[in-house]
Image: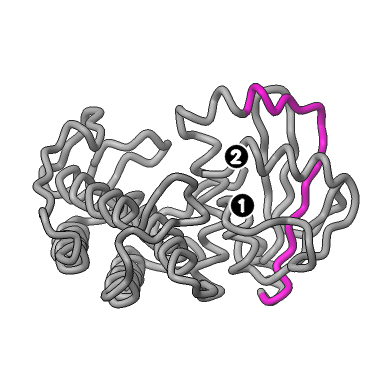
């Protein structure tokens, strides 16, 4: 795959990612105020809206701890004590408080500050970008639970696709699903219909080509022929990759090997 951009993915700085994260936290908090905590989250089977909010709040507090304390050894969420409200109605404010502390910790750190992560980029900049997309997708989950149709701004969604592919390429829990996926040179192509062509800057394009091999994959930006190709708005493509949209049934144009697409989505959705 292409090497990670050192400062601003798709031209964005660390501060840009922090500002976008702050805005997404506000959208999530505002969107769930007054919502039924017992509402089912269709994109996260078995979860209620309350469980979703607990998950996001715990993750925000975990990452705030990693960044603020400059943690450089593996430390997982269950290892960071978090106090939770007893009243389900208090969760929006609890989420807002933890989110503000997370953004403050990220803004206080240089993006190159060493901070443990499972990725090839163990620094604060990784976590600003990771928390942006984590929060954005879960904001979409909350909207689905409340009967709304989520939309993600095109620039954020395009970078989200880049980050998703880099994430599943390195995440330790993806090793077994990728082995189960197999791979013998099959090619998948995803084409965002609302991201302009990038000319001589392929890392800004809205097209991604994924090549499978045994137990792994590689990916590049740009146009290419595939065994299966999927076309649609970039917001929907990101939600498709995360398992929040269905690939068949009218929302996307799909050409080629649908079984290959279904296998990829089943093994890689987060």
Highlighted magenta segment, given as a residue range: 178-194
Kindly identify the residue that appears in the image at 67 percent across and 44 percent down: 265
The vertical placement of 244 against 214, above or below, is: below
SS at circle 1: helix
Viewer-proximal residue, 146 or 12?
A: 146
On the image, which quarter does residue 24 sit in?
Answer: bottom left
Across and down, in percent, residue 31 comes to: 34, 75
Q: Which residue is mark 2?
A: 268
Q: Position of residue 123 (x, y in %)?
A: 29, 45
Q: Residue at x 81, y 32 (%)?
A: 185
For the residue labelled by badge 2, is the local secondary structure a helix, a strand or a loop? helix
Image quadrant in which the N terminus is located: top right
Of pointers 1 and 2, the one earlier in the residue sequence:
1
Toward the viewer: 210 or 96? 96
Coordinates of residue 238 in the picture (x, y in percent):
58, 60
Q: Was residue 28 drawn as part of the magenta stretch in this picture?
A: no
> Label 1, on which residue?
241
**Residue lying farthest to the right in this orientation:** 256
Left or right of 198? Residue 135 is left
- Check whether the beta carbons of the residues at disc 1 and disc 2 lie within 8 A of each other: yes
């Amino acid at each position: 795959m292409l090497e990670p951009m050192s400062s601003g993915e798709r031209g964005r700085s660390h501060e840009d990612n922090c500002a976008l994260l702050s805005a997404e936290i506000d959208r999530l908090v505002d969107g769930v105020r007054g919502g039924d905590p017992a509402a089912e989250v269709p994109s996260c089977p078995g979860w209620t809206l309350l469980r979703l909010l607990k998950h996001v709040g715990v993750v925000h507090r975990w990452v705030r701890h990693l960044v603020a304390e400059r943690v450089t050894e593996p430390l997982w969420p269950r290892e960071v004590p978090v106090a939770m409200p007893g009243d389900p109605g208090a969760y929006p404010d609890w989420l807002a408080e933890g989110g503000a502390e997370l953004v403050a910790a990220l803004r206080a750190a240089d993006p190159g500050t060493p901070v443990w992560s499972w990725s090839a980029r163990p620094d604060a900049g990784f976590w600003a970008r990771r928390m942006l997309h984590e929060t954005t997708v879960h904001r979409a989950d909350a909207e689905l639970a409340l009967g709304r149709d989520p939309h993600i701004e095109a620039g954020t969604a395009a970078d989200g696709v880049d980050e998703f592919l880099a994430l599943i390429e390195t995440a330790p829990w993806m090793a077994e699903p990728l082995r189960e996926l197999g791979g013998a040179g099959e090619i998948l192509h995803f084409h965002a219909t609302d991201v302009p062509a990038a000319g001589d800057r392929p890392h800004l394009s809205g097209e991604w080509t994924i090549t499978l091999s045994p137990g792994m994959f590689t990916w590049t930006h740009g146009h290419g022929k595939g065994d299966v190709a999927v076309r649609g708005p970039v917001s929907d493509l990101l939600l498709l990759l995360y398992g929040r949209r269905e690939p068949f049934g009218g929302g996307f144009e799909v050409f080629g090997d649908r079984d290959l697409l279904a296998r990829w989505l089943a093994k890689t959705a987060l």
